[in-house]
Amino acid sequence: DAKTTQPPSMDCAEGRAANLPCNHSTISGNEYVYWYRQIHSQGPQYIIHGLKNNETNEMASLIITEDRKSSTLILPHATLRDTAVYYCIVRVAGNQFYFGTGTSLTVIP
Amino acid sequence: EPEVTQTPSHQVTQMGQEVILRCVPISNHLYFYWYRQILGQKVEFLVSFYNNEISEKSEIFDDQFSVERPDGSNFTLKIRSTKLEDSAMYFCASRFRTSGLQETQYFGPGTRLLVL
């Protein structure tokens, strides 16, 4: 299984960009990188996913390095409501997602 | 925007009792999942379900667990004889199809199960 490594916690000032890194050095060529977040004990919320090109949607941007061994999730203007645990997940063959421990992002007023 | 719903939001039960957790997946989705999260721990995969049968299950999903799609809209998780260690948040998820690895799973808000 392709593993991911994320810092356990990060802080970000409200209104600033939050850049959350993820290492996935063993990713295979057809595996996608997914980002989810979990606010308190709510259900994981889908944010964005990508294969090798940078992606952007209304929530965030995903930057994937050319060698695909790492990626960065960017929340362009963090708000207090973005305080959550962010999970970087590489989709393995089969159905399920493997959630790691993620990065606990705290947005500071 | 369509969403996955789950009932009840909270359930308290006595050890040894049976519980049924209910989920209504997004209407055109074909693949269904249960995950659980023990307090303070990771989200763990339990089981996936497609075409009225289990497609994959984890070691956690033992004989005490079963899943069913009884009426074409609901998707249920039954725990036959609950144990204290079954206390957790249970999340249902669904996705549309499996044409590739890119299909996204959408999660429900969860059911908090407490076994006393």
Image: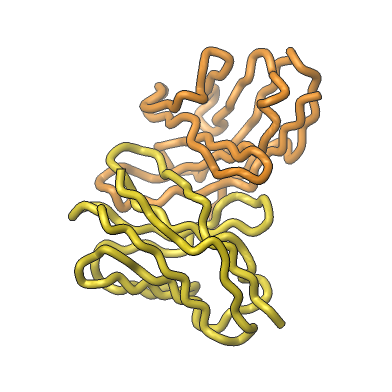
Chain colours: A yellow, B orange
Q: Position of residue B21 (x, y in %)?
A: 65, 29
x 68%, y 38%: residue: B111
Answer with the quarter of the image where residue A40 lies.
Answer: bottom right
Residue nearest the viewer, comparing A79 with A18: A18
> Residue B101: image x %, image y %?
28, 48
The vertical placement of A106 against B48, above or below, is below
- x and y, in percent, of residue B37 in the image: 60, 40
**Number of disc labels:** 0
Q: Nearer the viewer, residue A8 or A95?
A: A8
Q: Say which residue appears at 52% left-offset and 83% top-offset.
A: A17
Q: Nearer the viewer, residue B13 or A107?
A: A107
User: As drawn, is A7 to the left or to the right of B116?
Assistant: left
- Left or right side of A18 for A52: left
Using the rendered view, name the quadrant where residue A4 is placed. Answer: bottom left
The quadrant the N terminus of chain A occupies is: top left
Which is nearer the eye, A3 or B18?
A3
Q: In terms of image quadrants, where is residue B29?
A: top left
In the picture, the quarter occupied by the C terminus of chain A is: bottom right
**Left or right of A36: which side holds A15?**
right
Residue B106 in the image, given as x and y percentages of width and height? 49, 49
Residue occupying the point 35% across, 52% down: A90
Q: Is residue A71 above or below residue A27?
A: below
Q: Residue at x 66, y 24 (%)?
A: B20
Whether B42 is drawn above or below A81: the answer is above
